Image (cartoon, rainbow, N blue to C red):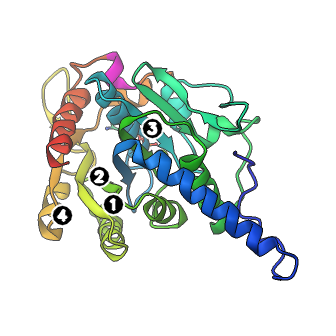
Amino acid sequence: MMDQKPGNAGCSGSACGSNTASQMASSMQDKLIAGSLAKIKNKLIVMSGKGGVGKSSIAANLAVALAQKGFKTGLMDVDLHGPSISQMMGLEGLLDITPDRRVLPMAYNQHLKVVSMQSLMTDANQAVIWRGPAKTGIIRQFVADVLWEDLDFLIIDCPPGTGDEPLSVAQTISDAKALVITTPQEVALLDVRKSINFCRTINLQIIGLLENMGPFVCPDCGEAIELFKSGGGAETAHKMGIPFLGSLPFDPAVVITADSGTPIIDQNADNQFAKALNESVSNIINRL
Ligand SMILES: Nc1ncnc2c1ncn2[C@@H]1O[C@H](COP(=O)(O)OP(=O)(O)OP(=O)(O)O)[C@@H](O)[C@H]1O
Ligand SMILES: [Mg+2]
């Protein structure tokens, strides 16, 4: 079960038998991981080379949108240093552990269960200070030890960049597909092109590029205000040869609803971001 101290290198000598013990533990964990993954039909990694482009907001709203359509959905937050999913989903408290030391994900609603690093920490303001192997360890535990039921979708929210977390997820979940997020501006696209090449290097299939923070349509005058420019996502997807899944508008309601703990798509389905997201969700489903 989750011991919160993964990645302990232990004794390096072979004589004490600890190597054999750790190999056995690792192969037992491999079996648990295979068992968990066999019950999950589609795994999507929400990622971006750039921070703050809306990965977590999209992961949360996408998970709710899929659950609204009746899909059994899991949402796994592997942003170990800056988990924001619990806040965005209004989930407080710690994860429950069963007597046989398995972890129960938290229910957002009947169709959507959530696991986040935040729900393992007794102090919400505690900082996680881990290096690569420890991070890989906890991500493997998230898959192995969490009692996911049969799921249609597992949405995985990653931190920015092409570091340990997306790499560990891709290695642990070999049939996962990447949903790459960008904003329209060149500064974001520069990093996003690196993400696309990262996916190609590690043979992680890309389901497509989704643009966030596209033009904000003024509710009073109807004018489209390009806060982060426009069109960059579609252009980059075309140039990089990957599917473009849509553009989600900048919308202050996304900020307010994230802070309130109920994603916008669950509060106002007629809102411009929610409508655009639902169109992109259809595009995603059609590409699976
Ligand atoms: N379409 C949008 N319109 C307006 N605000 C948005 C939109 N999408 C996200 N935001 C806001 O932008 C900020 C960053 O969003 P979010 O935390 O989802 O990004 P992130 O890519 O997950 O960030 P990080 O890289 O830190 O994990 C948040 O304040 C969020 O509420
Ligand atoms: Mg995030």
Mark 4 vs mark 1: give the one in front.
4
**206 or 229, nearer to the observer:** 206
- Magenta span includes 180: no
Name the kind of residue labelled 4 in the image.
Answer: Thr
For the point 43% across and 36% down, which residue is it? 74
Residue at the spot of label 3: 75
Residue type beneath disc 3 = Leu
Quarter-of-image position of residue 240: bottom left
Q: CA distance from mark 2 to mark 1?
A: 6 Å
Is 266 magenta? The answer is yes
Q: What kind of residue is marked 1?
A: Ala
In this figure, which residue is indicated by the disc labeled 2? 183
Question: Is residue 73 placed above or below 176 in the rendered structure?
Answer: above
Who comes first in sequence, dot 3 or dot 2?
A: 3
Question: Quick one: SS at disc 3?
Answer: strand
**Label number found at residue 236:** 4
Other residues around mark 2 within 10 Å, as few (<14) / some (14–19) / many (≥20) = many
Frontmost residue, 262 versus 40: 40
Q: Are marks 3 and 4 in contact (CB under 8 Å)?
A: no
